[in-house]
Image: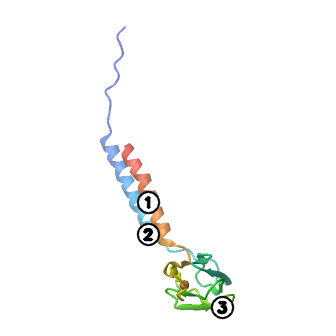
Amino acid sequence: MQPRLLPPPTRFPVRRAVVGAAGWVILLGLTAAILIIPAPAGPAPRDRTIRVEASSYAFDPARVEVNRGDRVTLELAAQDVVHGLYLDGYDVRLRAEPGQTARLTFTADRPGTFRMRCSVTCGPLHPFMIGKLSVGANLPMWRGAALAGLAAVFGLWFLRR
Ligand SMILES: [Cu+2]
């Protein structure tokens, strides 16, 4: 009995090209969507009080997150020596004597991440006494992460073809 001949391998160059083109269209569409989709409306603004303990040479908490539009009351409590808090971008400045609490209210109307720096020279490591205030969702970061994920998925897909 003769071995049956398998049909010659067929290739579908046209189909491959169409699938490839569709892949590019989807990739470009998703990329555009990630870049264009506007920020979702955040939660309703509210009043909040945030107590920051300052001691040589750190703020606790070192990272504060609020939503855009919140009315934020910052309380700065100096634990050991005189400390200050200057908030970049908002021009907010506090100064607390040892054992005392200084208080200030502002509206977090500017989105982004801002540095909180000690504004009173409190010792040799004073320049490193830095914290952060984040206002609103960190959209550039999420967009970057989404684009990286998309690139990884499509990179694998193109390699496998
Ligand atoms: Cu200081």
Residue located beneath label 3 in the image: 103
Determine whether the residue tagged by mark 2 lies in a helix, strand or loop.
helix
Residue located beneath label 2 in the image: 35
Tell me which residue sits at (44%, 60%) in the image.
148
Mark 2, other Cα within 10 Å: few <14 / some 14–19 / many ≥20: some
Label pair 3/1, CB-CB below 8 angstroms? no
Q: Quadrant of the N terminus?
A: top left
Give x and y (percent) for residue 22: 38, 53
Q: Can the viewer see residue 111?
A: no
Q: Earlier in the sequence, mark 3 or mark 2?
A: 2
130, 49: nearer the viewer: 130
Residue located beneath label 1 in the image: 148
- Kind of residue indicated by mark 3: Arg
Q: Earlier in the sequence, mark 2 or mark 1?
A: 2
Give x and y (percent) for residue 152: 43, 54
Asked whether, in this view, residue 156 is left or right of residue 75, the answer is left
Give x and y (percent) for residue 81: 62, 86
